[in-house]
Image: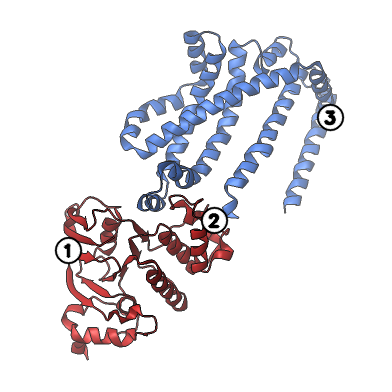
Chain colours: A blue, B red
Amino acid sequence: MLQGSNWGRWLFLSVFLCIWQIAAYLLESNQLPGPLAVMQSLWSHLTDGDLLVSVAVTLRRVVLAFTIAMLAGILVGFLMGRFPLIDTILDGVLIMGLNIPALVVIILCYVWFGLVEAAAVAAVAINKMPLVAVTVREGVRAIDHQLLQVGEVFRVPLLRRLVHIYLPQLYPYLMAAARSGLSLIWKIVLVVELLGRSDGVGFQLNTFFQFFDITSILAYTLAFVFVIYSIESLLMRPLENYLTRWRS
Amino acid sequence: MNGCRVKIKDKSFGEMSVIHDLEFEILSDAFISLVGPSGAGKSTLLNILSGLDTEFDGSLEWVDGGPGCVSYVFQDPRLMPWLSVRENIELVMKDAHDDSSWVDHLLRRVELHERADAFPGQLSGGMQRRVALARAMAIKPDILLLDEPFSSLDAPTAASLRELVLDLWRDHSSAVILVTHNLNEAVELADQILFLSKGPASIIHQEALNPSRIDPEVVRDPDRMTRDLLNCQPEILSGIAVVDGRNYKSANER
């Protein structure tokens, strides 16, 4: 079954690349370079070094914003799920945070704090944090209170309770928040870089856009997709498998 | 622990009184069974004794100043499914690393030392109950609370678990409070049976049983004892006790 699904995936990818190459050959336009041209461009950006530097800079911003958004979101979500009064107080702010367009937050951060690194990271983290908080709040509400009573009766210390009773019940919600968080943060980081930074993938894409260099844009996108797949297969999936090993 | 005096004047949920004027004493090596119909407030009483429920009118008076160490075997095992058998036991211990031999001893006692690394989902219902029992004993409690721990088990598994509870009680000098609606079970295990009225719960009858059962050589005949008990107290016990599906009848009913 697994082999079958892998086979289907490779077949789809091959057919997609063939159609892309044929379409590019027939159109003969700069606006749709073929996969071979994109691969050549990718190699040239790799050997020049600009691609690796840009991806590293963007990745650093992603990691920073992701960490801040997750930590703040988990804390706020946990408190809102656990204490109804805090939920009532913060619910309005949370709904506002969820619905304010990312672009508005980015512009405001740049206007208030200047075109600096901290403003860029803060803008991304602020955009993501409400989504993490909402997901974690739902997770805390769904916690099995009978298991919490075990911790209470046996007077399990608070830290041990958090690590062994609360957190494992929140793992599915945390993984969902992390996954949706990463995908959203990638996108917002590029916009932040495009608007107010002089390095990173977003900045490079803007430069290519000025020259209508579609080949380089697609080459960078390909590199970008590769990094996302690597994070998913080398970090997220093994982590999820480890955390849910008791289910097997 | 030298004992605990339980005095509950009233326990209510909103307008509904669940326990009213209930008093009894738990001696350090007592095995007390609370028998009563469903909805008699038995589990509420255990929640109060365990400290889970502190909103009641009354007091728990510990003879030596207390509060004593209380552990609880819930109706369902309530094991953490993501922790192994050993980790579930270690979770409740003060310092599991320094006391790993105690965990090993308990695992051997409940015959699960070979399944120490298994997750609860990989164990049968009976095995999970044994882990819950080992976990409850891990903190060396002064009082062990058992909330219908044998219900929903098949007869042979329930019998072996009852045997295990008795063995652990003999070995570890804890007081045991067993809540059950099964009079036969209470007679088989306990030294003292407290009969609770249908809510609001209060003690309507106490029965001290022959303590010779503490000697494992003396075999009890719970069937006969239950029959005798029902014959002696037909008015009081009629309608309270459900006896293992074997339909014991009081003298009046014959």
**Amino acid on which the number 1 mark rests in the picture:** Leu
Q: Quadrant of residue B184?
A: bottom left
Q: Nearer the viewer, residue A26 or B67?
A: B67
Q: Nearer the viewer, mark 3 or mark 2?
A: 2
What amino acid type should be assigned to the residue bearing mark 2?
Ser
How much space separates mark 3 and mark 2, taking CA atoms? Answer: 56 Å
- Image side of residue A180 versus residue B6, left or right: right
Chain under disc 1 = B
| Element type at mark 1 | strand
Whichever of labels 2 and 1 marks the residue nearer the N terminus, that label is 1
Residue B149: x %, y % from top left: 39, 67
Q: Are marks 3 and 2 on the same chain?
A: no
Callout 3 amino acid: Ile
SS at badge 3: helix
Kindly identify which residue carries mark 3. A22
How many residues crowd around disc 2 within 10 Å: few (fewer than 14), some, or many (20 or more)? many
Residue A234, given in percent of the width and then of the height, sits at 68, 38
Residue A148 horizontal/vertical position (percent): 39, 49
Residue for badge 2: B84
- Tags 2 and 1 in contact by the CB under 8 Å rule? no
Of labels 3 and 1, the one closer to you: 1
Q: Which residue is mark 1?
A: B22
- Horizontal side of B193 relative to B91 (left or right) equals left
